[in-house]
Image (cartoon, rainbow, N blue to C red):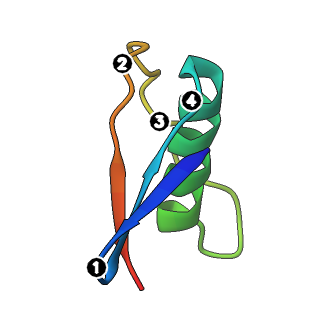
Amino acid sequence: MRGWREGTFVYYSAADVHVQRLLTEALFYADHHDGGTAESTPARSTGETSDAQVQH
């Protein structure tokens, strides 16, 4: 992961497509986890990476 700060925002970018896929699956799981198993699996990444924005 790469990160940089602009004011109160911190921007993160995946280092490569493999990291992006792991992050996508982890975030999907976190959004859909209810203490049991996830009901479905996320769509596979097309290989394109995008920046995620997180405010601290």
The residue labelled by disc 3 is 42
- Foreground tag (3 vs 2): 2
Labelled pair 1, 2 in contact (Cβ < 8 Å): no
Q: Amino acid at mark 2?
A: Glu
Quadrant in which the C terminus is drawn: bottom left
Report the disc number at residue 21: 4
Kindly identify the residue that appears in the image at 43 percent across and 13 percent down: 47
In the rendered image, the vertical position of residue 10 relative to residue 12, given as above or below: below
Which of the two residues, 10 or 23, is positioned nearer the viewer here? 10
Separation of marks 4 and 1 at Cα, in angstroms: 28 Å
Q: Secondary structure at mark 3?
A: loop
Give the foreground label among 4 and 1: 1
Which of disc 2 and disc 3 is earlier in sequence?
3
- The residue carrying mark 1 is 7
Q: How many marks?
A: 4
Residue 48 - label: 2
Amino acid at the residue labelled 3? Pro
Instruction: Give the alpha-carbon distance from disc 3 to disc 2, as whole Å.
Output: 15 Å
Q: Which of the marked residues, 3 or 4, is nearer the chain's N terminus?
A: 4
Q: CA distance from mark 2 to mark 4?
A: 9 Å
Count neighbours of disc 3 (C-alpha within 10 A) and say few if under 14, some if 14 to 19, many if 20 or more.
Answer: some
Labels 1, 2: front one: 1
Q: Where residue 14 sits in the image (x, y, percent)?
A: 53, 37
Horizontal and vertical percent for residue 2?
A: 56, 45
- From the viewer's side, name the closer residue of 42 and 54: 54
Q: Secondary structure at mark 4?
A: helix
Residue 7 image-quadrant placement: bottom left
Q: CA distance from mark 3 to mark 4?
A: 10 Å
- Side of 6 where 11 appears, left or right: right
